[in-house]
Image (cartoon, rainbow, N blue to C red):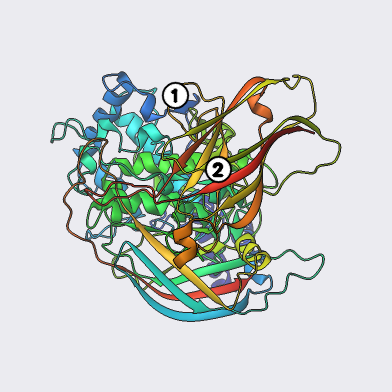
Amino acid sequence: MFRLTKLLAFAGLFAAVLWGTSCTPGDNGGDGTPTPSPTTPPVESFVRPNIGKLDLAGPEIAAFRAGVAAMQAKPSTDPTSWTYQANIHGTYDAGDLEAWDTCQHGSFFFLSWHRMYLYYFERILRSASGDPNFALPYWDYTDPTQRAIPEALRNPGDASNSLFVTERAPGINNGAQVPASATTFSNAMTFTNFASPQSSGLSFGGQTVPAPVHFGGIFGALESQPHNIIHVLVGGNNGWMIDPNLAARDPVFWLHHANIDRLWNVWLALGGGRTNPTTGNWPTQKFTFFDENGTKVEMTGQEVVDSAAQLHYTYAPGSGDEAGPETAVESRPSEPFTDAASDVVFEKQVGTRLTKQTKVALSFPDAPTLETASTKRDVLVIEGIKYGRPGVYYEVYANLPEGTAPDHQGPHYVGNIAVFGQAATGAEAASGKHLHETATLAYDVTDKKLGGAVTLTFVPKGLETTEPGLEAALPAHEIRFEKVKLVRE
Amino acid sequence: MMQPLPFLATLLLLACQPQPEEAITMESDQPKAEALATRDIDATLDRERVTVTFAVPKAMPEAAPGKTERLGLYLEGIDAEGAGVYFEVYAELPEGAAASPDSPHYVGTLSSFGPKGEKGTTVGYDVTKLVRDLQAKGRWDGELALTFVRRGLLPPPGQPAPEAAPGKPVKVKRVRLVRE
């Protein structure tokens, strides 16, 4: 009886110690100190700016540089230091300090983990910068004017610029550009499922995994492109960005991942069934970070599903925010729309042959404009397309002003004539008389509000090349089409 | 007589025991993907353009009514360490045809980001529409040709391409076609 009393007393004392600390399942304070819930976020809301729109000499860039410099001056053992924060992603450094080497790749934790990572990094950077209004910029490389890494990160190109590093791909610090196809995200946006079953890569956000995995081996669509490609191109053969254990040491890493995070919001805004996971371990798996005070914190997926409401930040406008070809769910030429109950606005037998290396314009005067309140749509139809020697495709523009450079992201862009098929060979090719297949292409041009004099411009496009000294010459080609019509239906 | 404090403390101790975790239903509990073709291609992408051809089932029936299907093409065992480039991937791209992401033959891009010494990563593509389009045009004939077109950094406008040590070739070990 006495021993039982002592046992119960010991158990009670032990329980009292537990009660005084924490008894919430899952806590891993390790040393017994409390592990708080994510620290109270700042009251204000922040707008992460598009770095391409910032003044190089303005306060935002100055604060960015000051904050990074301050973090870089701290010892690597300080959780708010540049090195410690970079090592959370991955590192070769000895020491294996708390949260080092914990980045999530190749699984559906990729986006949520990096959102948490950037959130606390930004708070640390804001504090270090001394600017309470600082927000982490993003690099919108899909914008054709931002294909080089932001100038603030390469100019000045010396140690006086805390955003400059030499460990990048050759030429990138001199303004070399990432190709357009590396920056597109339209494929990722076509997926309506955030996650896919384990071992499947057919999803926006990545495969389901039963537990956190540093590198899951199979990439979701957004991680594959543009995330992986940008790392490859900026890092080159042996720069920091190509290596997960060094990538976060390059300031461009944070701007790149801010853009990836932003594209997650773009995807959600598309709707159509696009939602974040609510089952399994995605919402509740905890990950460890440090706040601006160096206090260890934990965060879960369900705490980061709404960056505006929960984390108090949004993004300044960028690529994907406006509906356009880049965010179109279907980017391939489509079959003609229904012919039922349609009015032909104009129709012209043209028998046009497109062989020239320059643009060709067709004019259609006196087309009545679609009324604003009308529920009908305008469809531009090109019929009887025949081609002999493929090798190019054509961008089609409506009412492209004289002297204006064709821009497939501009308001006059209609779509492409992209033809395919086996090329003619031998005598047939030499004669140029053998034309293959006949196609009809249709484009919804309702938003173009065509009317009056309509001019269509066809701009031939060929292969881009990175080979020095090799001009992007267009191969010989011939495309004909018989008729162009505008249908209102 | 049992002391009240140890008794209460014991109750607290019992109350603070970890609760059994809820059973987690994973999406992997769903039916597995149906493997349609798995081929070791051991491709070395060491040139501007590389085409690899492999056998695929001639018969590719559509999903049963009421069931959605997704055809996935997976490139596996990717070793891209030190490459510094990426590849655009095309299916059945005609000889001499322009390689452009606007092409109906465009599948996607190939690159990889992972730790050094990574044994091989995997990239997957939804090729449902591509396969059905090829079938509709009578060009799904039991062999599928994938063309890899190398892409890298472009020089700034008006400047020559930078000098760069050639990177290591990218290698792809295997291709797999599945129905998910």
Residue at 60% of width from left, 76% of height from top?
Answer: B141
| Left or right placement of residue A277 versus residue A340 in this view | left
User: How packed is label 1: few (under 14 Cα within 10 Å), some, or many (20 or more)?
Assistant: few
Between B60 and A213, the residue placed more toward the observer is B60
Residue at the spot 20% in from the left edge and 31% down from the top edge = A155
Q: Is residue A57 visible?
A: yes
Going by the image, does A183 lie left or right of B170? right
x and y, in percent, of residue A205 in the image:
54, 54
Q: Nearer the viewer, residue B27 or A187?
A: A187
Where residue A102 sits in the image (x, y, percent)?
39, 57
Visible in this render: residue B1?
no
The quadrant of the rendering that contains the N terminus of chain A is: bottom right
Which residue is labeled 2 in the image? A416
Q: Which mark is residue A404?
A: 1
Quadrant in which residue B129 is drawn? bottom right
A175 to A6, vertically: above or below: above
Instruction: Determine crowd level at label 2: few under 14, some 14-19, many 20+ residues with C-alpha closer than 10 A.
Output: many
Quadrant of the rendered structure where residue A179 is? Answer: top left
The amino acid type found where label 1 is placed reads Thr
A154 lies above or below A202:
above
| Residue A454 percent coordinates (x, y) | 62, 24
